[in-house]
């Protein structure tokens, strides 16, 4: 049991402020427990903190201030404190920044209160206006979530008077309820489906691991459509039977709506949700109920990993290979790896689920660190799609056209049968480059060394690095000549324009994250497509992730070579994963599917591996290349990003770091650089990169910390160290 400190005892408090140490305070009247959330004076302000342990001492006792108050929240458990310390040590992140990740809930210090919430009523409105319909749709969509008047009005885009009118008519029910109600109990024995033999075997193995009560990580690898979700749902059910909590991480908010419906069908109630689309009120409720045990299952984005679970037993990382699990700003961490770390501390299980696992997970399974379970066939009558290459060198394709005659013919055949086709291009916007034909200048972002991308649907140019946007100019900003700006290359919007010309009778739907203001709008479009509301779907990688379109039988990849360009360490792996995932959207019901990959390089090893479907051969060859080069997962990398408003200042620090690399050389590490980052300026700051490469198994983080500590950063100079970088931009 954690220690309790009597009033006046010296305690060390970790605050959320950017300080490099714990601060000593006196325990307040009534004392406080270790792990207690507290409010403490810091200068003239009062800030949030956590009692971390006994005080350090060594101060004038008269100058030590007292804790202001202990907050009404369950104290942070030793397991979570240990996780924050170890995760911070691994990622070289100050502990105060780790604590901020674990306290992302508003109003932690507020006393329990009552509030008015709104739910669907039993009556019907006298007249169903658009505004009233939106209110009722939001209430139905949010299921068991409790919404305040302001939150419901904002979500539906209406005034509060519209909602109050619906209350008067009985179509909406107004209730008074405690602020942070527990979530409905889930029934682990309610809605389990009949499993195929290989699903049943995999589920039994997962449940056996959970019953052992010991730490373990399992790679659940199954072809797209094989029913991985049903298998790990059995692991969730077994965790709930044992009275422990479960967390399912998803890479995309857009996936959660369909997933939540499946959870509700399986367990009889909706779980807690944690992602950026959740209201402020609901975030507070989730945070408190997770700590109190009132939430058995949380479905969330990567930040849900830092919730204060009372008794965690299982973490599922769905689509574990997805790059969105790596946070690239602020605290640089990979949620997949941190899930494994946290489970090792709370003595629970991790399930890493994917049709195309990361090479790191594949290698860990091959080395025996992870248990591996395979699902080799699609669920029910569905079969894997046939995969073929379309060699563009032999196609008569005019300039500024990207849908080859062969692909056009295949799309028409599917439409004639009443089926759907997907045209996939992993490039947002209308065109990646806007060029002046008078002076040759490409329109760039004023704050970044990146091109502005034309978004014709929005009538704007957008920088995909910093988000800067500007109206589409009529004349060239460089030479002033009008009428000479030309779009170069395709994006999904331009592809949609071409498809509308080639298939004038077809109903088109474009799925790209730029085109939907809210997750609700995106969900509505996905439901409409799944119900047959489009003949041709045009999309970016958003469509590759988890969506199920029963009528979709043809996937046409417009540019299979796109991801193979450049020098990214993981280019081959990511292209392989993305192509396999996209192809897996086809033929998920009774109808057989076909995937056609347009390529200028049909003999490229990655393209050949995708077509052959021999995944193990691909991973083995990719692993051998990395092993020979000493690259992850058979070696270690750390990225160092220096940034400043003065480019010379950043380079001077980079050169000094490269020269004074003694701490790194002692552990056998090498420093490469400094060099300008591929995108050398973002938001007005110049960026310089170094790369540190080390043998596997060396104590790299302490060496990096000692190396970086030789230099004091002044003025506008910033340094970020990225352990196990996923991106090199």
Image (spheres, helix red, strand yellow):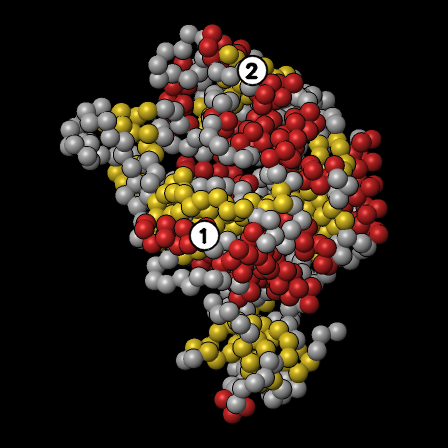
Q: Quadrant of residue 517?
A: top left
Alpha carbon of mark 1 to alpha carbon of mark 2: how far?
Answer: 43 Å
Relative horizontal placement of residue 446, taking residue 682 as reference (left or right) = left
- Residue 593: where, in percent of width, then height? 62, 18
Q: Nearer the viewer, residue 375 or 616?
A: 616
Crowdedness near tag 1: few (<14), some (14–19) or many (≥20) residues, C-alpha within 10 Å: few
Which residue is at 59% across, 59% downward? 702
Q: Quadrant of residue 675?
A: top left
- Whether label 1 touches label 2, CB < 8 Å: no
What kind of element bears circle 2? loop
Tell me the quarter of the image containing the C terminus.
top left
Relative horizontal placement of residue 163, taking residue 442 as reference (left or right) = right
Crowdedness near tag 2: few (<14), some (14–19) or many (≥20) residues, C-alpha within 10 Å: few
Which residue is at 56% across, 15% downward? 603
- Residue 624: where, in percent of width, then height? 66, 31
* Foreground disc of the pair 1, 2: 1
594 in relation to 177, above or below = above
Which residue is at 51% across, 12% downward? 391
What kind of element bears circle 1? helix
């Amino acid at each position: 049991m954690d220690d309790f400190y009597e009033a006046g005892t010296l305690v060390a408090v970790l605050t959320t402020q950017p300080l490099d140490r714990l601060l000593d305070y006196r325990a307040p009247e009534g004392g406080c427990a270790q792990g207690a959330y507290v409010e403490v004076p810091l200068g003239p302000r009062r800030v949030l903190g956590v009692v971390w342990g006994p005080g350090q001492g060594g101060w004038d006792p008269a100058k030590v201030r007292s804790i202001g108050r202990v907050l009404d929240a369950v104290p942070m458990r030793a397991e979570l404190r240990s996780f924050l310390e170890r995760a911070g040590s691994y990622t070289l992140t100050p502990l105060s920044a780790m604590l901020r990740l674990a306290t992302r809930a508003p109003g932690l210090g507020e006393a329990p209160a009552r509030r008015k919430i709104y739910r669907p009523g039993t009556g019907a409105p006298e007249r169903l206006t658009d505004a009233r319909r939106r209110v009722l749709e939001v209430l139905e969509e949010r299921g068991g979530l409790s919404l305040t008047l302001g939150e419901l009005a904002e979500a539906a885009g209406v005034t509060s008077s519209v909602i109050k009118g619906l209350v008067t008519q009985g179509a909406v029910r107004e209730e008074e309820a405690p602020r942070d109600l527990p979530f409905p109990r889930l029934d682990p024995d309610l809605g389990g489906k009949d499993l195929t033999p290989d699903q049943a075997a995999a589920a039994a193995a997962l449940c056996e691991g959970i019953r052992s009560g010991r730490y373990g990580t399992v790679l659940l690898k199954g072809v797209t459509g094989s029913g991985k979700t049903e298998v790990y749902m059995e692991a969730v059910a077994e965790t709930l039977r044992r009275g422990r909590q479960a967390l399912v991480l998803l890479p995309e908010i857009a996936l959660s709506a369909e997933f939540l419906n499946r959870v509700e069908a399986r367990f009889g109630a909706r779980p807690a949700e944690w992602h950026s689309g959740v209201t402020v009120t609901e975030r507070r409720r989730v945070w408190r109920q997770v700590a109190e045990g009132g939430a058995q299952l949380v479905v969330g984005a990567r930040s849900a990993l830092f919730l204060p679970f009372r008794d965690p037993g299982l973490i599922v990382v769905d689509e574990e290979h997805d790059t969105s699990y790596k946070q690239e700003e602020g605290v640089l961490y990979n949620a997949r790896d941190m899930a494994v770390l946290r489970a090792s501390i709370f003595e629970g299980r991790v399930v890493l689920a994917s049709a195309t696992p990361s090479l790191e997970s594949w290698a860990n399974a091959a080395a025996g660190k992870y248990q591996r379970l395979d699902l080799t066939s699609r669920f029910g009558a569905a079969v894997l799609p046939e995969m073929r290459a379309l060699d563009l060198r032999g196609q008569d394709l005019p300039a500024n056209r990207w849908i080859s005659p062969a692909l056009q013919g295949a799309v028409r055949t599917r439409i004639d049968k009443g089926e759907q086709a997907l045209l996939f291009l992993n490039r947002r916007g209308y065109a990646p480059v806007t060029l002046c034909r008078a002076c040759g200048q490409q329109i760039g972002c004023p704050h970044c060394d990146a091109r502005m991308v034309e978004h014709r649907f929005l009538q704007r140019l957008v920088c995909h690095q910093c988000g800067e946007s500007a109206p589409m100019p009529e004349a060239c900003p460089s030479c002033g000549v009008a009428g000479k700006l030309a779009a170069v290359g395709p994006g999904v919007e331009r592809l949609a324009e071409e498809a509308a010309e080639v298939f004038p009778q077809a109903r088109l739907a474009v799925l790209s994250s730029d085109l939907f203001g809210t997750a609700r709008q995106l969900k509505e479009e996905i439901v409409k497509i799944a119900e047959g509301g489009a003949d041709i779907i045009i999309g970016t990688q958003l469509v590759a992730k988890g969506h199920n379109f029963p009528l979709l039988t043809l996937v046409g990849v417009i540019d299979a070579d796109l991801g193979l360009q450049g020098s990214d360490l993981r280019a081959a792996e990511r292209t392989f994963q993305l192509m396999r995932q996209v192809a897996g959207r086809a033929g998920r019901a009774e109808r057989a599917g076909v995937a056609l990959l347009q390529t200028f390089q049909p003999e490229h090893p990655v393209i050949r591996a995708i077509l052959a479907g021999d995944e193990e051969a691909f991973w083995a060859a990719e692993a051998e290349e990395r092993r020979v080069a000493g690259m992850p997962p058979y070696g270690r990398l750390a990225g160092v990003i220096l940034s400043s408003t003065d480019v010379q200042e950043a380079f001077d620090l980079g050169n000094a770091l490269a020269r004074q690399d003694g701490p790194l050389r002692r552990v056998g590490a090498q420093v490469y650089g400094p060099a300008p980052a591929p995108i050398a300026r973002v938001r007005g700051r110049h960026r310089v990169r170094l790369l540190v490469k080390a043998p596997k198994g060396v104590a790299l983080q302490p060496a990096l910390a000692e190396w970086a500590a030789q230099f004091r950063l002044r003025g506008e100079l910033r340094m970020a160290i990225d352990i196990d970088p996923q991106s090199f931009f």
